[in-house]
Amino acid sequence: MAKKLRSQQWFGKKGKDGIIYRAWMKNQGIPDYEFQGKPIIGICNTWSELTPCNAHFRELAESVKRGILEAGGFPVEFPVMSLGETLIKPTAMLYRNLASMDVEESIRANPMDGVVLLCGCDKTTPSLVMGACSVNLPTIVVSGGPMLTGKYNGRNIGTSDVWRFSDDVKSGQMSQEELNIAESGLCRSQGHCAVMGTASTMATMVESLGLTLPQNAAIPAADSRRKVLAQLSGIRIVEMVKEDLKLSDILTKKAFENAIKVNAAIGGSTNFVIHLLAIAGRIGVPLDIKDFDRLSASIPLLANLQPSGEFFMEDLYYAGGIPAIHKELDSYLHQDCITANGKTIRENYQNVNCYNRDVITTLSSPFNNTTALAILYGNICENGAVIKPTAASPHLFKHSGKAIVFENIEDYKLRIDDPDLPVDENSVLVLKNVGPKGYPGMAEVGNMSLPLKLLEKGIKDVVRISDGRMSGTGFGTVVLHVSPEATLGGNFSVLETGDLIHLDLEARSLNVDLSIEELQRRKNNWKPSPPLSDRGYTSLYINNVEQAHLGADLAFLKGGSGSEVKRDSH
Ligand code: FES
């Protein structure tokens, strides 16, 4: 082995320190030949019964362990903060950066030579990758896999139907009894959301960055091949340690560009932007929000997956998986990017077949020619805003309408169904103070439910604008991530009901029809709301979180500190 194992700084020590490091491992019934001189592989586990999408991860970790032992390494499984999208209040995003700190410090502080990251539910992927990047050991990601496709009354359903069912119940088109039946068929196996929501987007992102073995993203959690992939990943991480193949060797600027192009082809979540920016910030790759539009604009939507299309992740796997998408994008990708298995991305996809052209379409005949991601600029969003055109309504791509402004989420909930709300199909709903600092944590509330009086008229979409985010399973003509956010006192902060707003997707513009003088007059009178917390982590977050166009990381977490521990403990 060319390089001395990092773990030997613990277990190879002589004297008192060495005794302490080794003896307390032996209390687990482990003979010292098991961990002495072998690559020690940390399995960073986000298992939690409060993260239902990751609740099968103890089983998955066992498969990884088998692979590590088979390859001559020694596995050590450790828990980190787990972020379950559905149960955590006020929003899992508030804790993404906190979890990444847990991951970073847990890896650096402990005797490990390589790491396997077990990721599933939305934030568990970026938080683990961000933390691992700040240490930069050899690292491989194993995703937990999507759920099997949901079933209701003979049809396929998924998380995107949550929004539809909710609106249907609200407008009386669906009964509570029907909803109960649908609810029981929605999540019918282990795994994360089965549409191309944020979890599937993140799993695709890590596969396209080269951080996983091929096919990581789409194998269903309940498919036995998910465990096979986990075991093979366990074997591979031991080899990666021997090769000293670190995250920084894989995560080049080209790898990030590949991930952005693939995201466009799959119609990935808008959350992709914020998480990829944060990961790039940790590994030290310069990435700008403008890169997302520049690299996505020429790529059509190839994957016919919900919420932009019809099918589910299970269908994507049977059709050939992400490598089949990569193959279709051959002419766009940097083909020489090295991946976790030591091969280039092209070597991984060149012999893959597509088995279902309804699910994975071709460049010459794509599912949708519209780009999946666009970045808007204008006097409402001087630092940018994000929209997902493939999930929006084409008749609203160019739209002017009068704003209905909600100052915060409570104001929205209080007034949205008020019969006197002056709203019609041309209105633009504006929701403020749901951004990184303002909510705090930038909640997924940007795809506001429409007012009852519009739903009753059969209207399914209007333009909506906020400084918050949208679930990757959501859809509609929804402008998100407005930066600077409302709590900072910029132009977005002073929008008022009745202002005329212009959205022009083709021109990538979002503006309010107000003079510079009027905007300045309003800003002079603007008063900030007091922060929602002045203590603990939330206060630390509010005071340090960066704006959405920079990835919403805590400013002091950017970059990394490497794997060296400066001082011994004993
Ligand atoms: Fe976990 Fe959707 S709730 S991935």
Image (tube, grey):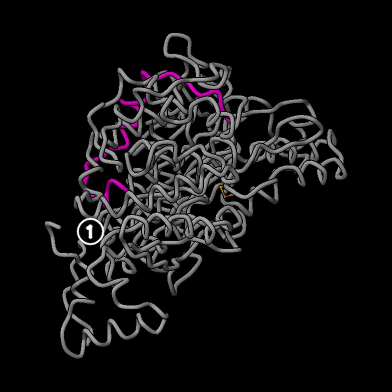
The quadrant of the rendering that contains the C terminus is: bottom left
- The residue under the point 44% across, 40% down is 216
Compare residues 28 and 293 and report the one nearer the observer.
28
Q: Position of residue 493 (x, y in %)?
A: 46, 46
Residue 285 is situated, as x and y percent measured from the top left of the image, at 22, 44
The magenta-colored residue range is: 279-307
- Residue 202 located left or right of residue 396: left
User: Residue at label 1?
Assistant: 560
Q: In this view, does 28 lie to the left or right of 1?
A: right
Taking the image as shown, residue 116 lies to the left or right of residue 285, namely right
Is residue 223 visible to us here? yes
What residue is rendered at 38% in x and 67% in y? 76
Question: What amino acid type is highlighted by mark number 1?
Answer: Gly
Tell me if residue 291 is in the magenta stretch.
Answer: yes
Quadrant for residue 260, please give it.
Answer: top left
Residue under the image location 39 percent in, 84 percent down: 27
